[in-house]
Every structure is written in C-alpha cells, then in structure tokens.
Image (cartoon, rainbow, N blue to C red):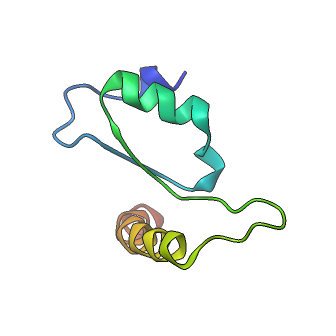
Amino acid sequence: MLPRLLDPENEYDYYWADSAFSGECFEDQLTLCGFESRIHERDAPYHPLSDAAKERNSIKSSIRACVEHVFGWI
C-alpha cells in the first residue's frame, strides 16, 4: 500500500514518518520507489538508542513538528 501513497512527481525525495513506520519492509519499499527515509529510529527492548540516534531523531522531530502544527491548526 505504501507505494500507492508515494508520488513520484514530488519535488523532494524524502519520506518523513514516526517510528511506527520503521522496519525493513518500509525501508525496502521506499528504496524501490526512489525515496530517502526520514523515519524515526526505534529502540529495542533492553537496547536503548545511542546518543547519535537520539540526535538524529531530534532533528527529524523539529522538522516534522513544523509541518504537523500547520495541519493541527487547520
């Protein structure tokens, strides 16, 4: 279903999502469709995220929040 949601005519080739959309299946589909993943990283039980992964998630969150606030305002 994911490939039907992706628009190949999109100006940018990034896909932004939270960690609910993480996993090899999503990553493979994004690669096949020519998109670069900006999906949040998820920690595993008993394996917390590294400081670098937390920093990457923080950067992704700051950008996603700007977009989501616009839709929330509507």
Quarter occupied by residue 3: top left
Residue at the left extreme, as displayed: 11
**In the rendered view, does 56 fall on the left or right side of 7?**
right
Q: Nearer the viewer, residue 73 or 1?
A: 1
**In the rendered view, does 51 fall on the left or right side of 37?**
right
Q: Is residue 35 above or below residue 47?
A: above
Q: Is residue 71 above or below residue 31?
A: below
Identify the residue at horizontal 16%, vertical 40% (top origin).
11
Identify the residue at horizontal 60%, vertical 46% (top origin).
22
Q: Nearer the viewer, residue 61 or 56?
A: 56
Give the quarter of the figure containing the N terminus.
top right
Q: Position of residue 40 (x, y in %)?
A: 53, 58
Q: Position of residue 45 (x, y in %)?
A: 83, 62
Q: Position of residue 48 (x, y in %)?
A: 71, 71
Q: How many marks?
A: 0
Q: Position of residue 66 (x, y in %)?
A: 35, 71
**In the rendered view, does 47 fall on the left or right side of 60?**
right
Q: Nearer the viewer, residue 22 or 10?
A: 22
Identify the residue at horizontal 47%, vertical 66% (top origin).
72
Residue at the right extreme, as displayed: 46
Q: Is residue 11 above or below residue 57?
A: above
Give the quarter of the figure containing the C terminus.
bottom left
